[in-house]
Amino acid sequence: MHPDLEKLVVLQGLDVEAKRLRDEMAALPKHVAGLAAKAKATVGQRAVVVGLIAKEEKLRRQQELDVKGHQAKIAKVQKQLDQATTTVQVTAFEHEIAFARAEVGKLEDAELESMERSEGLDAQKALADEAVASDEKILERERARAEQTIALDKTALVEVEAKRAALRPEIGENALSIYDRIAKAKGTAVAEALNQKCMACQMMMRPQKWNDIRDRGNDETMMTCESCGRLLYYDPARDAPQRKTVPVESIAASIIRSL
């Protein structure tokens, strides 16, 4: 394998890890913010239920006052009825008492309906209380986990960046330029050639190119995938089982061992 390509394989591993760490550090605050928004929404939903419960309680208090008012009116008119001297007065007073009693009946029915609604709302509030407590617990746990993970990622990123900074000057300027150009366009610049296929784009190689990359292994020039344009490397240790004759240490393992 071309010596620069070996180093580019390691460099890409560092670049991928650095990106993963940055992405994770950027994603975790958004994740926590999403949980905080959800917890806030749950609190808001609970507040709506609490407001409806208070509204029903206020309604019943007013209904009770109205019932007492009608009952007082009935008692007053009943006294007037007892003192009535004409049929017209008796009829008028009886109508007033009947109307007031009918209103009391309506109010009492409405009060029962309000109590039934309150029972349903109380059940909703119990569920809302559980949801609020659960969301707050999850938010607290995830916030702590995010803070811990970000702290670890920052430390790991410093180490990765230090390795990248040390490795890049060891790579030829031309090879590094090609790598940076492809990585900027494709996200990754190096791909393994395995079983006559580019493992990045999954496109098959022409038999001649496959034979060239296996036999020559990019010793002189770095080969690229004809489909995606990435630099290709061949690892004999990962070739198809029928081609293995003796145990061969993988390229990645040998590079890591040498670091």
Image: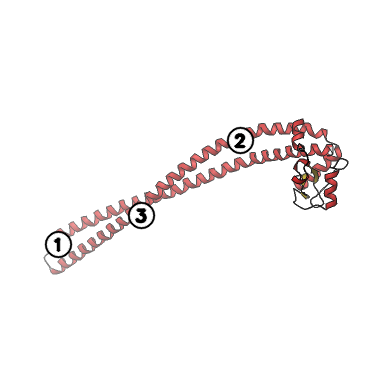
> Which of the two labelled residues, at mark 3 and mark 1, occupies the earlier sequence position?
1
Circle 1 is placed at which residue position?
81
Q: Can residue 214 be seen in this view?
A: yes
Residue at the location (20% across, 58% down)? Answer: 74
Which mark is in front, 3 or 1? Answer: 3
Q: In this view, does 201 lie to the left or right of 72?
A: right
255 lies above or below 244: above
**How many angstroms separate mark 2 from mark 3 (CA)?**
47 Å
Which mark is in front, 2 or 3? Answer: 2
- The disc at residue 149 is 2
Q: Which of 81 and 228 is in front in this view?
A: 228
73 lies above or below 19: below
On the image, which quarter does residue 23 sit in? Answer: top right
Q: Which amino acid does label 3 sit on?
A: Arg
On the image, which quarter does residue 163 sit in? Answer: top right
Q: What residue type is labelled 1?
A: Leu
Q: Do the residues labelled 3 and 1 touch (CB within 8 Å)?
A: no
Q: Which amino acid does label 2 sit on?
A: Thr
Q: Is residue 142 left or right of residue 7?
A: left
**Colour scheme used in the picture?**
secondary structure
Q: Nearer the viewer, residue 140 or 76?
A: 140
Residue 127: x percent and y percent? 42, 47
SS type, badge 2 = helix
Residue at the location (83% across, 41% down)? Answer: 177
Q: Which of 120 and 141 is in front in this view?
A: 141
